[in-house]
């Protein structure tokens, strides 16, 4: 008995900004948008999924960005992702901590903190 895996992450977003979510999570990060179930579609937001990765954005009326809590997203080419983000006007902060991974932080269009992680060769999945 116990928790065996993470099913999805839920990130809050402001009402009416689904297009900005699509531009960031799909066009920049490359995670495909999937239709929300019909019974949830009227709530706004957007769902993005690729393999085991499931990022659900939900509308929060009194929205405040998550500045500390964040998802850590594994990427295959951290440098390329950082260059794309910077070319689109996003601030990217490289992390110098020696944790056996390369990582950087950015924020989505709503100010939510996002961590991008690439395992050093020979480590991770």
Image (spheres, rainbow, N blue to C red):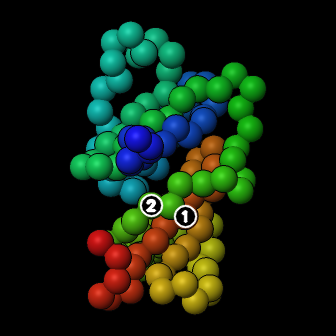
Q: Residue at x 60, y 36 (%)?
A: 12
The residue depicted at 50 percent of the width and 21 percent of the height is 44
Extreme-front residue of the structure = 1
Q: Position of residue 120 (x, y in %)?
A: 38, 86
Lower position in the chain sequence, tag 2 or tag 1:
2
- In percent of width and height, residue 8 lies at 42, 41
Farthest-out residue, left: 51
Q: Secondary structure at mark 1?
A: strand
For the residues labelled 2 and 1, the Cα–Cα distance comes to: 6 Å
Residue 78 visible? The answer is: yes
Image spot of residue 20 (x, y percent)? 50, 40
Q: Residue 104 sits in which quadrant? A: bottom right
Rendered image: mark on residue 115:
1
Image point (40%, 56%), residue name? 28
Say whether residue 19 is visible: no
Q: Position of residue 119 (x, y in %)?
A: 39, 79
The answer to which of 13 and 51 lies nearer the viewer is: 51
Q: Quadrant of the N terminus?
A: top left
**Vertical position of residue 44 compared to residue 64: above or below:** above
Which image quarter holds the C terminus? bottom left
Residue 92 drawn above or below residue 122: above
Residue 21, relative to residue 80: is it above or below? Answer: above
Q: Which residue is mark 2?
A: 73
Name the quadrant containing residue 41.
top left
Q: Residues within 10 Å of mark 2 (few under 14, many from 20)?
A: few
Whether label 2 touches label 1, CB < 8 Å: yes
- Give the secondary structure at mark 2: strand
Q: Looking at the image, which is closer to me, 82 or 98?
A: 98
Horizontal side of residue 68 vs 16, given as left or right:
right
């Amino acid at each position: 008995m116990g928790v065996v895996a993470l099913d999805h992450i839920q990130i809050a977003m402001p009402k009416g900004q689904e297009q900005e979510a699509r531009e960031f999570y799909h066009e920049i990060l490359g995670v495909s948008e999937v239709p929300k179930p019909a019974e949830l579609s009227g709530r706004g937001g957007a769902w993005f999924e690729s393999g085991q990765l499931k990022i659900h954005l939900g509308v929060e009326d009194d929205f405040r960005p998550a500045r500390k809590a964040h998802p850590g997203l594994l990427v295959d080419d951290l440098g390329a992702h950082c260059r794309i983000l910077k070319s689109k006007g996003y601030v990217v902060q490289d992390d110098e901590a020696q944790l056996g991974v390369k990582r950087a932080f950015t924020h989505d269009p709503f100010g939510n903190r996002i961590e991008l992680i690439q395992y050093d060769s020979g480590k991770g999945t």
